[in-house]
């Protein structure tokens, strides 16, 4: 069994163009090429809080929504181009609007991807409390494996050791590799 069979044939790169997302982009390109998988790219344009009502459904001015959606399409076009400029091949680019982590997971479910690849900003303290961690939320809610990419120069979590996300993913891949070796 090859690595391509182990990881599947569809990868989803969730990106926002940040430095951390650029690292995830390079990792996704290498992984897609190395496994022969198709690479999908998703960009989520967050909607301002005032554009949602209490039930969680959009409640907005249609003109303002179209402006935000246009900005999202332009950002997605640039991100798609940056993947191609880095030598990658994009099967399809997807624009989503709303809560970032929720939309990434929903897109992954709809596409039935085998692996989600995201960058991690490693926010700490009050920034993390206010903004939350998109990569952590995606990891907790996704139905498929999630690969979180972070810069080498960023230290691991302040609790010591490796972050939980990396440890779980490496355990899953280690178990799968061990099972393959026994066949």
Image: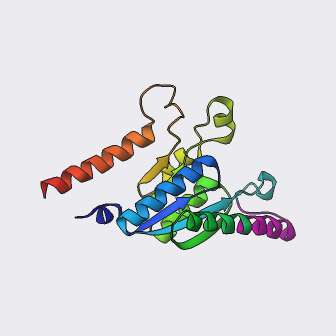
Q: Residue furthest left?
A: 183
Residue 61 vs residue 126: left or right? right
Q: Position of residue 134 (x, y in %)?
A: 59, 47
Give the extent of the magenta segment: 57-73
Image quadrant for the C terminus?
Answer: bottom left
Q: Is residue 61 above or below residue 17?
A: below
- Residue occupying the far top of the picture: 159
Q: How many numbered badges does the structure rendering display?
A: 0
Task: Quarter of the image for the N terminus: give it.
Answer: bottom left
Q: Position of residue 100 (x, y in %)?
A: 63, 55
**Front in this rendered view, residue 163 or 55:** 163
At which x and y percent is residue 51? 79, 58
Looking at the image, which residue is at 44% across and 59% down? 30
Please check the rendered image and state whether residue 64 is part of the magenta-colored stretch, yes or no: yes
Q: Position of residue 107 (x, y in %)?
A: 55, 65
Q: Looking at the magenta stretch, what is its main secondary structure?
A: helix
Which color mode does the image show?
rainbow
Query: Does residue 181 belong to the magenta stretch?
Result: no
Of all residues shown, which one is farthest toward the bottom?
91
Most foreground residue, 26 or 130: 26
Residue drawn where x is 19% and y is 56% of the image: 180
On screen, residue 51 versus residue 166, left or right, reads right
Q: State left or right for residue 46 relative to residue 106.
A: right
Q: Is residue 104 above or below residue 110?
A: above
Judge whether 70 appears above or below 142 on screen.
below
Q: Residue at x 64, y 29 (%)?
A: 125
On screen, residue 176 above or below 128? below
């Amino acid at each position: 069994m090859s690595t391509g069979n182990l990881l599947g044939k569809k990868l989803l790169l969730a990106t926002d163009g940040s430095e951390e997302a650029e690292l995830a982009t390079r990792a996704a390109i290498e992984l897609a090429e190395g496994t022969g998988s198709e690479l999908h790219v998703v960009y989520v344009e967050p909607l301002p809080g005032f554009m949602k009502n209490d039930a969680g459904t959009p409640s907005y001015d249609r003109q303002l929504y179209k402006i935000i959606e246009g900005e999202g399409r332009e950002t997605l076009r640039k991100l798609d181009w940056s993947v191609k400029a880095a030598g990658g091949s994009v099967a399809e680019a997807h624009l989503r609007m709303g809560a970032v982590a929720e939309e990434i997971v929903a897109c992954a479910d709809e596409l039935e991807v085998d692996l989600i690849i995201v960058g991690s900003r490693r926010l700490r303290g009050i920034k993390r409390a206010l903004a939350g961690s998109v990569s952590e939320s995606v990891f907790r809610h996704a139905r498929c494996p999630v690969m979180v990419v972070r810069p080498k120069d960023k230290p691991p979590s302040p609790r010591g050791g490796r972050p939980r996300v990396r440890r779980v993913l490496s355990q899953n891949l280690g178990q799968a590799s061990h099972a393959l070796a026994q066949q």
